[in-house]
Image: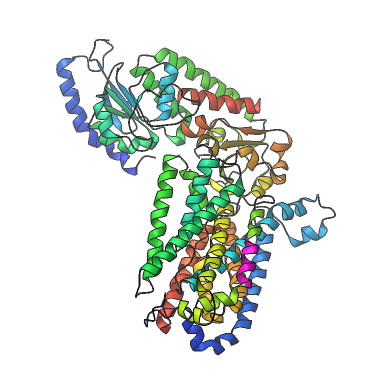
Amino acid sequence: MTTTSPHDAGPAAPWRAAGLRRAAGSRPAAVAAAALVVAGALASLFLGAADLAPADLLAARSLDDPAVELLLVSRGPRLLALLLAGSAMAVAGLLMMHLTRNRFVSPSTAGTVEWAQLGLLLATLVLGSTGVLERMLVAVVAALAGTALFLRLLRRLVLADTLLVPLVGLMLGAVVSGVTTGIAYRADLLPVLATWTAGDASGIIAGRFELLWLVVVALAVAWWQADRFTVAGLGEGTAVSLGVDHGAVVRVGLVVVAVVTAVVVVVVGAVPFVALVVPNLVTIVVGDDIRRALPVTAAAGAAFVLLCDVVGRVVVHPYEIPVGTVAGVIGGVVFLVVLLRLRGRGVSA
Amino acid sequence: MRPPATRHRPALLAVPTALLVALAGCGTPTADGAADAPGDVLVVEHAQGTTEVPRDPQRVVVHDLSVLDTLDALGVEVVGVPDFEAGDALPGYEDVETVGTLHEPDVEAVAALEPDLVVVAARSSTSFDALSEVAPTIDLTVDQADFLPSARERVETLGEIFGLEDEVAERLDAVDALAEETAALAADAGTGLVVMTSAAEVGAYGAGSRFGLVHDELGVAPADPDIPEASHGDVVSFEYLAETDPDHLFVLDRDAIIGEGGTAAAEVLDNPLVARTAAARAGDVHYLDSFAWYIAPSGLTSLETMVGEVHAALA
């Protein structure tokens, strides 16, 4: 998009307007995010259906000790999975925000999540319950195709209002989700679909989350290409004049977003608002330089998902509320607050 | 699930029922008599009131798989069934006319079959009113809070309609006797927990739940007495299973019935935390028949299967 309407300030505008002041806020934000991750990690390790106290671990003398086993089989893997999923989804949201130059576009408002779910369902129908890797591959391809379609649509439509862009994405996602539900209904897979659509970490133990390590590769690519993404976020015209191949950057970003979304959907399920709320909050404080915002976004995303999961484990102890449900409630409230604040300040909304 | 409003139905139905009785009375003086004359009717009490049903109806449409399970066991032929896939559980209905899905009966398709009797229950009970306009309809939904006696009553109603009271009574008495024997065994069997696995997610069910039969009537002491009576189960982690440590783990594999949806239950439960439970160490992890427990829990053969499975588990 090369429009320069006053509404289309894009995420780059606040950064340019207040770059220095915002930059100064970067270090405290990073420290705060890191502190939240540590707090979330400790809570995640020591709160759950079974009792596990740090003292139990210190008292353990062998790897067969029940406390150690609990840590290695259940708590540890769950913590790692949530860390990976949360940070990756938040970074995916940050990239989408820049690729579309719109604060409200994330994998969940662009239909990426819904496409990944459709791919997962189709793969399950065709391939059966075996072959997690194959199923994930199909989900990645579907997420990629769907998100590319969304970006193409955006190029066709010259949208004056920033809010229309995510609206188009939401509509597209709703259509895809409708198709998915229809197919699942026909195939008697509705309950299975429900467990995919609500992110749920209760089943995560050692041996059932390792695919999530793939998102580390995606995160590394995002980090490596961070400056290019920042420039792409300034708009195609600016990017090209600065010697950046805008199309290539968009393609790389698309692949990162699609891989992250599909892997997380396959392993954990959809966790709403992480990709939307976290990058928005972080860029308000840190600014839009991706190299600076990325680590803070990753940490804040991980902390958000960890804390949501801990809340879900504690409120109905020893049973659980899926992390996706908690994230939906907390994320929704935070999002509304952010939205109202942004409007109040006159920042591009 | 029945809508809360059903409580008032009997009163609402009283007027049309009275009219029907009057009309029927014109042709057959013995409205509720013992005569076997054609056109003889029976007043059937069911979950949504009372309905006049012809004795031994020939054209029966069934919307519920529990009811179909019972009729199948009794050798009663039906002319319409919902579109269902039950694997090997209920074979031989491929050529029978389908009349909508398990949840949504197709009223027009039912009307086209010109049935003498339509039976709804549980998932299809909300269509009672619409179907009643088409043909005599009864709702054989079972009261979950009073499961075995209520299921028995429903099966007996079917036996009465089709004149198979003796066979029904014999089989139900056998179920009751086995249930009593099971409860006696349960007294010394330690604790039990019922879980349902679905796409690698585990839900726990307690007393009063849809699988409450295990605790409520068959007497297995709940490993966790605090599980709320949620019909969809409370999501639990594997460490919950380790912590609850039941002596008997009853497992329902939902993916097994709905196709290739997820990982099979045995695979889901194959981990060190479950292996730590008393049930796993003693070989007391019992996989339940998903058709009987999940799809058609109040059918005659389902009742036999369910009580039989728990009995075998504790014996």
Residue interval drawn in magenta: A215-224
Considering only vertical position in the picture, is A172 above or below B118?
below
Task: For residue A221, say whether it is visible.
Answer: yes
Considering only vertical position in the picture, is B255 above or below A172?
above
Residue B32 spot, x, y in % from top left: 26, 17
Give the color scheme: rainbow, by chain, secondary structure or one colour. rainbow
Q: Nearer the viewer, residue B102 or B14?
A: B102
Residue B223 spot, x, y in % from top left: 63, 41
Residue at 57% x, 76% y is A228
Relative to B264, B67 lies left or right: left
Residue A339 spot, x, y in % from top left: 43, 75
Considering only vertical position in the picture, is A93 above or below B59?
below
Task: For residue B153, say whether it is visible.
Answer: no
Relative to B281, B69 lies left or right: left
Which image quarter: residue A172? bottom left
Indicate the quadrant containing the C terminus of chain A: top left, top right, bottom left or bottom right: bottom left
Residue A314 spot, x, y in % from top left: 59, 59
The secondary structure that dominates the magenta segment is helix
Tell which residue pokes out farthest to the right in this image: A61
Q: Nearer the viewer, residue A263 or B97?
A: A263
Considering only vertical position in the picture, is A155 above or below A322?
below
Q: Is B265 part of what is drawn in magenta? A: no
Which image quarter: residue B74? top left
Q: Is A218 part of what is drawn in magenta? A: yes
Relative to A80, B65 lies left or right: left
Residue at 55% x, 62% y is A255
